[in-house]
């Protein structure tokens, strides 16, 4: 059987690196049958790579370069013979957790009968499973009777609709559950001692790195992964030790199975009574956002607010205009402007309200009303309700181990915060991945600080930027303090030495993950003055690396502020292990609530809300 999978990777990935490509194919996709590869350069159009089984070509991969929105994206079409390769089945269903007396009964509120009313026209996901393939998987893996019943119930509710994959790759819930599941394994002593399925871990680590891939409903590869993930989800969800924000949502909202009117979804969520509350850090945020849902549900059901006409020029304190009166009415409707004043005069009270609205919507709080600010004011109440619902679902999948002390980076807010209980001792601006080089959502533990780091330049940058610069200037490498350290196929491997001009600045912060993403310093300080800070290749640049270094190493008496300063300004790379690793949570919250109970909203910079909302809701999203 031939399976076609299309991958789109961030520009910093270089799939023409043949050893890495060989490992990527051999481990998750081609099993041990792959023995060697042949490579042919196609005159600048890419690489044609033949993978052989016992000397017989059986698959080929075409690596093409294509340009989209000024970003280079490497697209790979993979044809792999998987017919003789049961890499998912057999070893896949080793027990990952054990039942306890306190286990939560799975899907008590879910009927056992199959819901055949869910068709492609109304489904959350228009990718449906072959029921015989699912039953065959269950038989092959000798899954326990109780688990079989739970899996059957799980898919009956969905009319055997995929839960974790959509036609263009993992669903947001699929990515979120895998992050939750793997982080839980890393933190739980009981889970660490359980046997792991290395094949599933390998293939999922490969899949989560991919921005998109094409999934066929009848592809046995994805059927096997899908059901394996479902079995693990059921075990995780029903284990009382894992109780958290995940259980604060009705199951049908946690894993949506059909598109629903957002107002009806809000009503269902607000009437739901969870078994108990949760004490993880996300639980407080979740409850606060749920309180905002009450407000916006009422606003949306009562027609929201009237749009404001774009002002002629800008408006500020002291101005007088009919638009000012319209703005006051708009802000009164959402509780952002107290009182009943609707005069056309831009007074002190409105100035305060405008500055607050700007700050909570990602603008510079200067009190000046511009066209772009009015555009945000005109986002309908129902669209804000949709945004709140999407972010509540996103929050529900956060690991429950994240409690008192952690580092949080919110991508759409371009900010990093260090949390210690109710306080935020460190807060700074960050630069995140540009479009096509998205910074990913995940959780890890910061365990190393690297002072005066060297930079192993990604091959995509070598190919697209450095080699052309070398042709124009033979002394380019020397000027940039770079050196050639080897070759991968025909591409030079280049390292930038520690010290002045290094792209990673004076320090980087490591937290192992599948995406090769880390925090680091930068010499390009001017970028932090920008309102929208999407400039990196996926890693996260921090505005105040010395402050973050001092905080991370605060419990290590060997690292005083003076010693940190010396190490940062050295030209000798130095690795320091963090005594007590700190959780790092990289989120994509476009709606959240601050400690004062005020709603903050941000632009959907990577279009995650738009994609997920289109799957969740019947009503189309408003154009913002």
Image: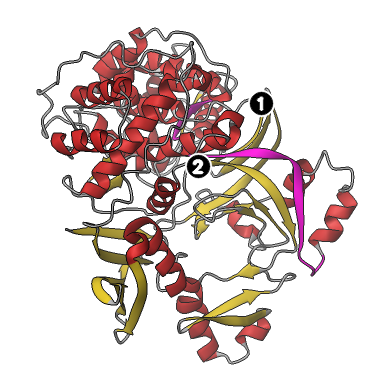
Residue topped by disc 1? 404
Asked if residue 302 shows in the view, the reply is no
Q: Is residue 20 above or below residue 336?
A: below
Indicate whether residue 275 is drawn in magenta.
no
- Residue 519 badge: none
Q: Which span is picked out in magenta?
A: 570-593
- Residue 66 placement: quadrant: bottom left
> Looking at this view, is 61 or 331 the one in front?
61
Between the residue at mark 1 and the residue at mark 2, the CA separation in whole angstroms equals: 18 Å
Residue 213 % position (x, y): 28, 54
Q: Is residue 610 above or below residue 515?
A: above
Rendered residue at 14%/29% (across/down): 122
- Residue 269 placement: quadrant: top left
Asked if residue 408 shows in the view, the reply is yes
Residue 362 % position (x, y): 50, 38
Relative to 112, is 452 on the left or the right? right
Rendered residue at 54%/26% (across/down): 400
Indicate whether residue 579 is drawn in magenta.
yes
Q: Is residue 122 above or below residue 21?
A: above
Q: Secondary structure at mark 1?
A: loop
> Looking at this view, is 151 or 459 the one in front?
151
Q: How many marks?
A: 2
Residue 179 % position (x, y): 47, 39
Residue topped by disc 2? 442
Identify the mark nearer the N-term, 1 or 2: 1
- Give the quadrant of the C terminus: top left
């Amino acid at each position: 059987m031939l399976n076609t999978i299309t991958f789109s990777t961030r520009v910093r990935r270089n799939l023409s690196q043949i050893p890495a490509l060989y490992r990527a194919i051999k481990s998750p996709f081609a099993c041990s049958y792959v023995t060697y590869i042949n490579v042919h350069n196609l005159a600048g159009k890419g690489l044609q790579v033949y993978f052989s089984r016992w000397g017989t070509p059986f698959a080929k991969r075409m690596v093409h370069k294509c340009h989209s929105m000024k970003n280079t994206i490497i697209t790979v079409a993979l044809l792999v013979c998987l017919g003789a390769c049961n890499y998912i089945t057999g070893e896949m269903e080793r027990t990952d957790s054990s039942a306890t007396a306190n286990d939560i009964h799975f899907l008590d509120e879910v009927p056992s009968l199959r819901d055949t009313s869910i068709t492609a026209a109304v489904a959350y996901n228009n990718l449906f499973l072959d029921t015989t393939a699912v039953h065959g998987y269950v038989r092959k893996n000798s899954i326990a009777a109780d688990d079989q019943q739970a899996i059957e119930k799980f898919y009956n509710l969905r009319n055997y609709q995929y839960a974790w994959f959509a036609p263009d790759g993992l669903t947001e819930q699929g990515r979120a559950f895998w992050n939750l599941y793997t982080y839980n394994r890393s933190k739980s002593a009981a889970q660490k001692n359980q046997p792991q399925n290395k094949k599933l871990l390998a293939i999922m680590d490969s899949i989560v790195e991919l921005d998109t891939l094409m999934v066929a409903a009848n592809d046995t590869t994805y059927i096997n992964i899908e059901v394996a993930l479902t079995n693990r989800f059921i075990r995780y969800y029903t284990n009382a030790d894992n109780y958290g924000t995940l259980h604060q949502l009705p199951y049908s909202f946690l894993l949506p199975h059909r598109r629903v009117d957002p107002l009806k979804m809000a009503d269902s969520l607000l009437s739901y009574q969870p078994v108990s509350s949760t004490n993880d850090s996300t639980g407080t945020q979740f409850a606060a956002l749920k309180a905002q849902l009450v407000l916006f549900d009422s606003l949306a059901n009562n027609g929201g607010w009237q749009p404001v006409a774009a002002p002629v020029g800008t408006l500020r304190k002291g101005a007088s205009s009919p638009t000012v009166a319209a703005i006051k009415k708009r802000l009164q409707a959402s509780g952002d402007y107290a009182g009943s004043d609707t005069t056309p005069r831009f007074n002190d009270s409105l100035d305060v309200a405008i500055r607050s609205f700007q700050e909570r919507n990602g603008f510079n709080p200067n009190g000046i009303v511009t066209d772009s600010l009015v555009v945000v004011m005109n986002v309908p109440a129902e669209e804000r309700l949709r945004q709140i619902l999407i972010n509540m679902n996103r929050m529900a999948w956060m690991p429950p181990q994240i409690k008192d002390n952690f580092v949080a980076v919110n991508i759409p807010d371009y900010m990093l915060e260090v949390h210690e209980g109710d306080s935020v001792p460190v807060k700074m601006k960050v630069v995140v991945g540009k479009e096509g080089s998205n910074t990913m959502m995940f959780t890890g533990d910061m365990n190393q600080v690297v002072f005066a780091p060297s930079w192993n330049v990604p091959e995509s940058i070598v190919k697209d930027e450095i080699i052309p610069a070398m042709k124009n200037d033979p002394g380019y490498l020397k000027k940039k303090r770079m050196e050639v350290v080897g070759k991968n196929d025909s591409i030079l491997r280049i390292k930038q030495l520690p010290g002045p001009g290094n792209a990673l600045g004076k320090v980087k912060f490591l937290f192992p993950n599948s995406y090769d993403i880390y925090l680091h310093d930068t010499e390009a300080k001017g970028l932090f003055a920008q309102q929208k800070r999407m400039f990196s290749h996926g890693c996260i640049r921090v505005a105040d690396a010395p402050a973050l270094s001092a905080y991370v190493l605060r419990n290590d008496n060997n690292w005083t502020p003076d010693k940190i300063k010396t190490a940062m300004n050295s030209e000798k790379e130095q690795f320091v292990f963090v005594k007590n690793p700190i959780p790092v949570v990289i989120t994509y919250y476009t709606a959240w609530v601050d400690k004062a109970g005020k709603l903050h909203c941000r632009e959907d910079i990577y279009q995650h809300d738009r994609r997920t909302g289109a799957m969740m809701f019947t009503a189309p999203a408003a154009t913002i």
